[in-house]
Each structure stands twice: as structure tokens, then as C-alpha cells.
Image: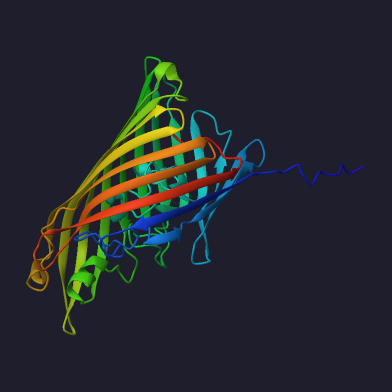
Amino acid sequence: MTQQSSKNAFNPAISLILNGTWGRFGDDPSTRITGFAPSGGEVIPGRGGSLGESELFLSGNIDPYFRGALLAALTPENTVEVEEAFFETLALGKGFTAKGGRFFSGVGYFNQVHPHAWDFADPSLVQNAFLGRNYGDDGAQLRWVAPLPVLVQFGVELGRGREFPGAGEVERNRNGAESQVYFANVGGDIGVSNAYQVGASHLRQRTATDGSAFLDYDDITGTSNLFQGRQRIDGLNFVYKWSPDGNPKYRNFKFVTEWFQRRYDGDFTFDTTGVAATDAMNAKQSGWYAQAIYQFMPYWRVGGRYDRLSHGNVGLNANAANLTPPDFDPTRYSVMLDWSPSEYSRIRLQFNRDRSRQDLASGEAITDNQLFLQYIFSLGAHGAHRF
């Protein structure tokens, strides 16, 4: 006799994240970070009340060998975007785990953190400029954790290069792996109250066949441009956590810092009044941030963050006569206070003193004082966040 299966035999955990922000800006928030392009992936809350992305999570074990997860972002523009949809192995053994599908990349530390788990209402400047909100790809990932008393992890990813970092999704019509990511993490406990993690990562990728526009340069000159070539991003990160006797419920402290360096090598085409000029281009830019979060009593946290980008060196060869990249280093200070009456809700007040955009006439930084009031509510089951 055939055994009937229950309709509830497969019952994934489901959660919905509600996220909204009220923002006050002194300057137009749609203006891009000066001198760091492509910057189409920037994330800046809008003026006034705005509904952020609502996140729908579904996850569960498929069988003893695989688990699956889906993250769908419901945007204020009434669209649905599949941000993550992947399977992951549960029983490879020997410390190996494989993942396939669409997922946030292991490049850096912050990139893998979902927006509802951010410590601030917006990403760091270097994340925004180099990777966008969360850089993800369609492909496969393999991780290995060494059998040691401390965490030693290595990982590699091969993807189709769905996104050229910062520029959003691009169409590719080529076989093979168009992007590669390599990362390593080392961490452990120091006594019973302290823990740390150190990480390094490398991303390499080529533009799509038809290239990628440096949007910030378009804004500066009003003339179109195109870059075709290779991009490489190297990153280092450090995370330190403290909680008395290892119990973070009442008091805890977290410090995070990341540094990235981005290099371009390829051909740059600049349209000078209808005449396109093409020559080799190479660039090296960097950026970093440091942030500290302290929960000083149950439910209440305070935090501060400093961001800085370095314009570095940009070589345009013959196109140097047509375009002068901005000699400008964007910076920003941020402070926040949030209240979390439970693990399912958070209200945050944040202030930014933003100097990431340049007045092209005077050459001085535009100081923009920004104020945000944010809510984050979680409905349903939700798994633990990463270290």
C-alpha cells in the first residue's frame, strides 16, 4: 500500500521584515558620491517618509542533505526582486559546505549582512561606492572550515557576473565564470567575554560586452562615457565583540572596520561633442570605515561611525585632455541611538554629517546634515544573524 505524505511534511520557516524611514536632508539626496563611479548601486533613504524594502524570507531543510532559502525584496515601487534564492549542502563532511543559486557574496564582512540587521540606516560609503547595497551573483560557492580549535575558513565563488559592482544588474551573453571571489576568515574567543574575527577577500570581474558607464562622470560633464575592462577589489576586515561572561543580553559592545581597494584596467571611451575618443585607463581607489556599537542597558544601543574614501590615482592617458577626475576625498560622520523592546522590533534615530559630494564650482565639500528616524519590525520565525 502506498503511504500518503502529509501536506505539512515540508513546512519552511517564514518571516517578513517591515522597514521604513523618515529622512531630512539639507541637500538633494539623489546626488551621487563625487569621483566614485559607477555608483548606481548607492542606497540613500529619501526625503520625508519613505517605505523601505520589505523582505520576505523562506527557509528550511529540504532533506538530510540540502537546505534552501529565498529572500524576496518587496520594493516601494511595487516590484518584487529576488535577492537570494539558493540551496546549501548539509552533509558534505570534512568541513566542506557548497551553495548554489543566487546569494550575497562573501566579499568583505558587511556585504553579507541583510539590511534589517544593519547597525545604521544606511551602508558605509565604501560599500555604497564599490559594491552597492549588497553585492550578489548567480553561481556557486564552496567553503571549507579547518578542524582547528579556532575558526579558520576559506571560500571561493564562481559567478556569471550578474552585477558590475555599484552599477546594478547587467546583461551578459558569454559562457563561463565572469566573476570570481576568494575569501578567508580567522576568528575565535579571547577568554569568556571577548571574541574576534579577521577576514580578507578578493573580487575580480569584467564588464559586460557593451561596457559600463561611469555615472558620476556623466553627472560632472553631461557627456556620456564607457569603460570596458577588468575590475579587482581587495578587502580586509576586523570584528571585535565583548559581552560580560559571554552574555550579550544586558550589555555588549561591537567594533567593525573594513578597508577596500578597487583597481580598474581597460579602455575608456569619452564622447567629446559627438567625437568618441578611446584610450587605455587604469585607476586605483580605496576607502574604509570604522564603527562602534554599545548596548549600555537592556533594549538600548548607541553607535558611531566614520567613513572615508580616497580618490587615489586615475590615469586616462589621451582622455586626460577631455576629463579631469575630481581631486576629492569624501567623508562622513554618523551617530545613532536605537531602542529594541524585543528581538522583533527596533526604532532608530540617526544623524549623519555627510561630506561625500563636492561643489564643482568651488571645489569644496558640500556639508549635508542628515536626520533619519527608522523602524524595523520582524514577523515570524527568523534565524540567528552571522558573527
Pick whichever, 34 or 325, lies toward us. Answer: 34
Vertical position of residue 152 compared to residue 340: above or below: above
Query: Percent x, y for residue 299?
Result: 46, 32
Pick whichever, 120 or 86, lies toward us. Answer: 120
Please give left or right for residue 48 compared with residue 361 in the image. right
Vertical position of residue 189 compared to residue 259: above or below: above
The answer to which image quadrant residue 241 occupies is top left
Please give left or right for residue 206 compared with residue 74 in the image. left
Identify the image quadrant of the N terminus: top right
**Residue 214 visible to an observer of this rendering:** no
The answer to which image quadrant residue 41 occupies is bottom left
Please give left or right for residue 326 compared with residue 190 in the image. left
Vertical position of residue 251 compared to residue 292: above or below: above
Pick whichever, 104 or 295, lies toward us. Answer: 295
Query: Percent x, y for residue 166?
Result: 32, 58
Identify the image quadrant of the C terminus: top left
Residue at (50% x, 61% y) in the render: 75
Query: Percent x, y for residue 386?
Result: 45, 35
Residue at (38% x, 45% y) in the render: 349
Please give left or right for residue 300 compared with residue 326 in the image. right
Q: How is the image coloured?
A: rainbow
Vertical position of residue 257 compared to residue 329: above or below: above
Q: How many marks?
A: 0
The answer to which image quadrant residue 260 occupies is top left
Residue at (52% x, 65% y) in the render: 79
**Residue 328 visible to an observer of this rendering:** yes
Query: Percent x, y for residue 74?
Result: 53, 59
